[in-house]
Image: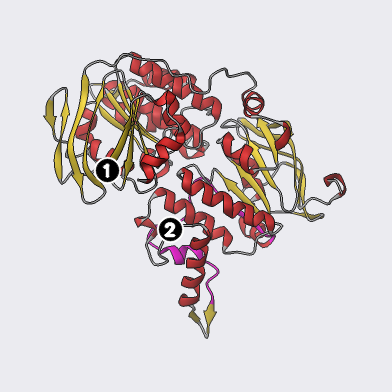
Amino acid sequence: MSKTNITPLLRMSNISKSFPGIQALTDVSVNLFAGEVLAIIGENGAGKSTLIKTLGGANQPDQGHMEIEGNPVRLTCPLVSQQHGIGIIYQEFNLIPFLTVRENLFLGRASHSFGLIRSQDERKTTRELFDRLGADIHPDTPVAALSIAEQQLVEIAKVLVTDVKIVVMDEPTATLTPREVQRLHDVVRELKSRGIGIIYVSHRLNEILELTDRVVVLRDGKVVGQRNIHSTNRRDLIELMVGRPIEDEFPKQPQVPGSTLLSVERLNWSDRVVDVSFTVAAGEILGITGLMGAGRTELAHLLAGAVPPDSGRLLLDGQEVRFHSPRDAIRAGVCLLTEDRKNQGLITDQTIQQNFSLPNLDRLSRYGIVKTGTERLSLAHYAETLQIKMVSGSQLAGQLSGGNQQKLVLAKWLQRRCRLIIVDEPTRGIDVGAKYEIYKLLNELVEQGMAIIMISSELPEVLGISDRVLVMQQGRITGEITDPRRATQQQVMELAAG
């Protein structure tokens, strides 16, 4: 029987939603069938997050209606959405840091016996869930002690602990390594085999083509195309998303590196960074990759002055430097774009303009007074260059989509004119069109003599953009790839796995 004769598990019909100054969705219709993995893709600002929040009860549509298993529903709040069997895994985490993993999973639905929480039963269920996800996370670990990738797995487990009919995953693999991605895909296939419908939102087109059954493409809040996965390809999807052809997804321009800018000599920190030595030259993009727990982010924090090393030396232009704080590093021209933009990269309850200007006040002010005209022009320049979709500089940073938040973080460091930028997962949650613009910008920066250390778990990105690649495992550098364009992902994984 064809799907045209089957009642959809979920029907969203003619959904429209606007916010002040923005028409986020216009007449969007989407069907999801039981046992189907439906991809929803589009550039940042295309309306994906708004559609997800509407399904999750966080947004109320201006018009349109929804049905679940043929029955009309009004999802007036997140609780009502959950009661209808809808589980949302948002891109930005909703975890309570000071509670344990178990407590986060069962918050609001703890099991009781004679008024006492059955914590042992909850621990058992938690362990079983993480066994399914292939993760070694203890139920009693505080969430604050987990890495970003581990927190992502906790978010996934929060949904799986409930009795769901529909699971929505918003960029679920953005912080995961290839091995962890495959484990997650196995979980998705298991859910599919149980008749659960899955809406899968991702900018990683390779996994869309590998994992999903159908694709719905959004652009500017409208559905611009739907494809059966077997009748489309990567280039077709990219052109639908951006509305134009992109010839080379990784526009790397070969550079002749200049003199050594940074030398790292036998750097150590606890057991997370062990005897690490390398150099990076002006005019070079140095890629660093590895599996979760390899020590990549810890290395970035050492280089940016966020934590002091136990031993080892850093040399800028051949002169030893000691960073006692990020302020010291910034003054020396070393800037870090963190992987956690929400908690470490932005002050989300301040405006876009305030976030952009904060590390640049000395450049944007005179005699202690901010030059508002220069400030606005500087932001406008990077908003156009990076295609940041915003209403105005007075909009709160927290109101931007995840991808546009990431571009805002990049913009403030570009305004700082750092000599060395360390970018940790720079394109996490950013669409293919915006990635292309960021790659071009990175090329332009190294052409100007800047050095870039790019930490990424996306192997095609690392191999496509870097001049050299270092691979880490358990805090150590286990290999160097001097010609990334000729290397394979398998070669990288062999070095990363040891």
**Could you say where residue 115 lies in the image, as x and y percent from the top left?**
51, 83
Residue pictured at 53% horizontal, 79% vertical = 112
Pointer 2 local density, CA inside 10 Å: few below 14, some 14–19, many at least 20: some
Most foreground residue, 65 or 278? 278
Residue, disc 2: 96
At mark 1, the secondary structure is strand
User: What's drawn in magenta, residue-wise?
Assistant: 84-111
Q: Is residue 209 above or below residue 385?
A: below
> What main secondary structure does the magenta stretch of the protein show?
loop
The amino acid beneath tag 2 is: Ile
Pointer 1 local density, CA inside 10 Å: few below 14, some 14–19, many at least 20: many
Q: Is residue 101 above or below residue 481?
A: below
Q: Please indicate, yes or no, whether residue 263 appears anywhere in the rendered image.
A: yes
Q: Kindly indicate the quadrant of the structure image that contains residue 266.
A: top left
The magenta stretch spans residue 176: no
Q: Kindly indicate the quadrant of the structure image that contains residue 468.
A: top left
Label 2 or label 1, whichever lies nearer to me, is 1
The C terminus: image quadrant? top left
Instruction: Give the side of residue 288 with respect to residue 73, left or right.
Output: left
Q: Please indicate, yes or no, whether residue 387 appears anywhere in the rendered image.
A: no
Query: Which badge, 2 or 1, comes first in the chain's sequence?
Result: 2
The magenta stretch spans residue 95: yes
**Could you say where residue 460 lies in the image, as x and y percent from the top left?**
47, 31
**Could you say where residue 392 lies in the image, as x and y percent from the top left?**
50, 27
**Could you say where residue 479 lies in the image, as x and y percent from the top left?**
31, 36
> Are circles 2 and 1 on residues that touch, CB within 8 Å?
no
Q: Which mark is residue 476?
A: 1
Residue pictured at 26% horizontal, 49% vertical = 272
Instruction: Give the side of residue 483 with respect to residue 44, left or right.
Output: left
Instruction: Give the side of residue 446 with respect to residue 487, left or right.
Output: left
The amino acid beneath tag 1 is: Arg
**Alpha carbon of mark 2 to alpha carbon of mark 1: how far?**
32 Å
